[in-house]
Amino acid sequence: MSPDKPQNKVMVSNRRALHDYLVIDRVEAGIALRGTEVKSIRSGQASLAGSFARITDNNEAVLYVNIPPYEFGSAINHDPKRPRRLLLHKKQIGKLHAQVKEKGCTLIPLGLYSKQGLIKVELGVCKGKHRSDKRETLRRRTADREAQRAMAAHRKSS
Protein backbone atom coordinates (compact mmCIF):
# COMPACT_ATOMS: atom_id res chain seq x y z
CA MET A 1 0.00 0.00 0.00
CA SER A 2 1.63 3.23 -1.13
CA PRO A 3 1.12 6.49 0.81
CA ASP A 4 0.19 8.52 -2.30
CA LYS A 5 -2.86 6.34 -3.15
CA PRO A 6 -5.88 7.15 -0.94
CA GLN A 7 -8.02 4.29 0.31
CA ASN A 8 -11.74 4.54 -0.56
CA LYS A 9 -13.82 2.61 1.93
CA VAL A 10 -17.29 1.86 0.59
CA MET A 11 -19.78 2.22 3.44
CA VAL A 12 -23.12 1.90 1.64
CA SER A 13 -23.85 0.86 -1.94
CA ASN A 14 -27.03 0.94 -4.00
CA ARG A 15 -26.92 -2.32 -5.96
CA ARG A 16 -30.63 -2.12 -6.71
CA ALA A 17 -30.06 1.09 -8.70
CA LEU A 18 -27.69 -0.72 -11.05
CA HIS A 19 -30.43 -3.28 -11.69
CA ASP A 20 -33.28 -0.81 -12.19
CA TYR A 21 -31.45 1.99 -14.03
CA LEU A 22 -29.03 2.42 -16.90
CA VAL A 23 -26.18 4.60 -15.61
CA ILE A 24 -25.26 7.21 -18.23
CA ASP A 25 -22.73 9.26 -16.24
CA ARG A 26 -21.12 9.12 -12.78
CA VAL A 27 -20.11 12.08 -10.61
CA GLU A 28 -18.37 12.23 -7.23
CA ALA A 29 -19.76 14.80 -4.78
CA GLY A 30 -19.21 15.79 -1.18
CA ILE A 31 -22.12 16.02 1.26
CA ALA A 32 -22.77 18.65 3.95
CA LEU A 33 -23.35 16.45 7.01
CA ARG A 34 -23.67 16.89 10.76
CA GLY A 35 -21.52 14.96 13.25
CA THR A 36 -24.03 12.30 14.20
CA GLU A 37 -24.83 11.71 10.51
CA VAL A 38 -21.18 10.95 9.80
CA LYS A 39 -21.04 8.51 12.71
CA SER A 40 -24.25 6.84 11.55
CA ILE A 41 -22.93 6.45 7.98
CA ARG A 42 -19.58 5.11 9.20
CA SER A 43 -21.39 2.47 11.23
CA GLY A 44 -23.17 1.40 8.00
CA GLN A 45 -26.68 2.40 9.03
CA ALA A 46 -27.56 4.60 6.04
CA SER A 47 -29.86 3.24 3.38
CA LEU A 48 -29.82 4.34 -0.26
CA ALA A 49 -33.05 2.51 -1.11
CA GLY A 50 -35.50 5.06 -2.45
CA SER A 51 -32.98 7.91 -2.30
CA PHE A 52 -32.49 10.47 -5.04
CA ALA A 53 -30.95 13.87 -5.75
CA ARG A 54 -32.40 17.02 -7.28
CA ILE A 55 -31.19 20.33 -8.64
CA THR A 56 -33.21 23.07 -6.90
CA ASP A 57 -34.46 26.34 -8.40
CA ASN A 58 -31.52 28.29 -6.94
CA ASN A 59 -28.95 25.94 -8.59
CA GLU A 60 -28.11 23.81 -5.58
CA ALA A 61 -27.83 20.05 -5.64
CA VAL A 62 -29.73 18.36 -2.81
CA LEU A 63 -29.63 14.70 -1.75
CA TYR A 64 -32.70 13.03 -0.22
CA VAL A 65 -31.51 9.99 1.70
CA ASN A 66 -32.55 8.27 4.93
CA ILE A 67 -29.76 8.32 7.53
CA PRO A 68 -31.13 6.91 10.81
CA PRO A 69 -30.20 8.67 14.07
CA TYR A 70 -26.92 7.64 15.68
CA GLU A 71 -27.80 5.19 18.45
CA PHE A 72 -25.23 6.58 20.89
CA GLY A 73 -26.13 10.21 20.11
CA SER A 74 -27.68 12.62 22.57
CA ALA A 75 -31.07 14.32 22.46
CA ILE A 76 -29.62 16.66 19.83
CA ASN A 77 -29.59 13.99 17.13
CA HIS A 78 -30.20 14.82 13.44
CA ASP A 79 -33.46 14.53 11.49
CA PRO A 80 -33.18 11.26 9.46
CA LYS A 81 -35.00 12.52 6.36
CA ARG A 82 -33.67 16.07 6.09
CA PRO A 83 -32.39 17.11 2.63
CA ARG A 84 -28.59 17.26 2.52
CA ARG A 85 -26.74 19.71 0.32
CA LEU A 86 -24.29 18.26 -2.20
CA LEU A 87 -20.95 19.99 -2.62
CA LEU A 88 -20.36 20.44 -6.35
CA HIS A 89 -18.87 23.13 -8.58
CA LYS A 90 -21.24 25.42 -10.48
CA LYS A 91 -20.19 23.90 -13.82
CA GLN A 92 -20.86 20.38 -12.53
CA ILE A 93 -24.32 21.42 -11.31
CA GLY A 94 -25.06 23.02 -14.70
CA LYS A 95 -23.96 19.88 -16.54
CA LEU A 96 -26.07 17.64 -14.29
CA HIS A 97 -29.08 19.96 -14.66
CA ALA A 98 -28.80 19.76 -18.47
CA GLN A 99 -28.57 15.96 -18.36
CA VAL A 100 -31.53 15.64 -15.97
CA LYS A 101 -33.69 17.83 -18.21
CA GLU A 102 -33.57 15.00 -20.75
CA LYS A 103 -36.70 12.90 -20.71
CA GLY A 104 -36.51 10.02 -18.27
CA CYS A 105 -33.20 10.94 -16.60
CA THR A 106 -32.76 11.26 -12.85
CA LEU A 107 -29.96 11.57 -10.28
CA ILE A 108 -29.54 8.43 -8.18
CA PRO A 109 -26.90 7.94 -5.46
CA LEU A 110 -24.93 4.78 -6.26
CA GLY A 111 -22.80 4.65 -3.13
CA LEU A 112 -21.48 6.39 -0.04
CA TYR A 113 -17.80 6.02 0.74
CA SER A 114 -14.95 7.56 2.70
CA LYS A 115 -12.15 9.30 0.83
CA GLN A 116 -9.28 10.79 2.82
CA GLY A 117 -11.52 10.99 5.90
CA LEU A 118 -14.41 12.72 4.10
CA ILE A 119 -17.76 11.18 3.21
CA LYS A 120 -18.42 11.26 -0.55
CA VAL A 121 -21.39 10.15 -2.63
CA GLU A 122 -21.21 8.71 -6.13
CA LEU A 123 -24.12 10.11 -8.12
CA GLY A 124 -25.31 8.51 -11.31
CA VAL A 125 -27.26 10.21 -14.07
CA CYS A 126 -29.64 7.34 -14.75
CA LYS A 127 -32.37 6.37 -17.13
CA GLY A 128 -34.97 3.80 -16.09
CA LYS A 129 -34.67 0.33 -17.63
CA HIS A 130 -37.62 -1.46 -19.16
CA ARG A 131 -38.34 -5.06 -18.25
CA SER A 132 -36.81 -6.28 -21.52
CA ASP A 133 -33.59 -4.35 -20.79
CA LYS A 134 -33.32 -6.02 -17.38
CA ARG A 135 -33.77 -9.45 -18.98
CA GLU A 136 -31.10 -8.67 -21.57
CA THR A 137 -28.66 -7.63 -18.82
CA LEU A 138 -29.30 -10.88 -16.93
CA ARG A 139 -28.86 -12.92 -20.14
CA ARG A 140 -25.56 -11.18 -20.90
CA ARG A 141 -24.29 -11.73 -17.34
CA THR A 142 -25.22 -15.41 -17.46
CA ALA A 143 -23.50 -15.87 -20.84
CA ASP A 144 -20.33 -14.13 -19.56
CA ARG A 145 -20.31 -16.31 -16.45
CA GLU A 146 -20.68 -19.50 -18.50
CA ALA A 147 -17.91 -18.39 -20.85
CA GLN A 148 -15.60 -17.76 -17.88
CA ARG A 149 -16.37 -21.20 -16.46
CA ALA A 150 -15.71 -22.87 -19.82
CA MET A 151 -12.39 -21.06 -20.18
CA ALA A 152 -11.39 -22.05 -16.60
CA ALA A 153 -12.33 -25.70 -17.26
CA HIS A 154 -10.33 -25.66 -20.52
CA ARG A 155 -7.29 -24.23 -18.70
CA LYS A 156 -7.54 -26.90 -16.00
CA SER A 157 -7.71 -29.73 -18.52
CA SER A 158 -4.70 -28.44 -20.49
Image: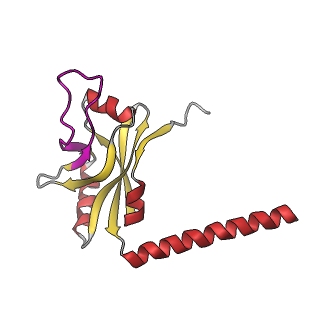
Is 135 left or right of 118, judged from the image as shown? right
Q: Where is residue 144 in the image (x, y as percent from the top left)?
A: 62, 69
Q: Which residue is drawn at 49% across and 71% down?
A: 137
Q: Which residue is drawn at 56% across and 68% down?
A: 141
- Please tell me whether residue 156 is drawn above or below residue 7 in the rendered image: below
Where residue 100 sits, quadrant-wise, is bottom left
The single residue placed furthest to the right in the displayed view is 158
Q: Is residue 125 visible?
A: yes
| Overall secondary structure of the magenta section | loop
* Residue toward you, 138 or 23: 138
The single residue placed furthest to the top in the displayed view is 74
- Please tell me whether residue 75 is drawn above or below residue 82 in the rendered image: above
Is 80 left or right of 109, judged from the image as shown? left
Q: Give the range drawn in magenta.
A: 62-86
- Please tell me whether residue 122 is drawn above or below residue 72 in the rendered image: below
Q: Which residue is drawn at 26% across and 23% down?
A: 73
Q: Which residue is drawn at 19% across and 55% down?
A: 55
Q: In which quarter of the image is the N terminus?
A: top right
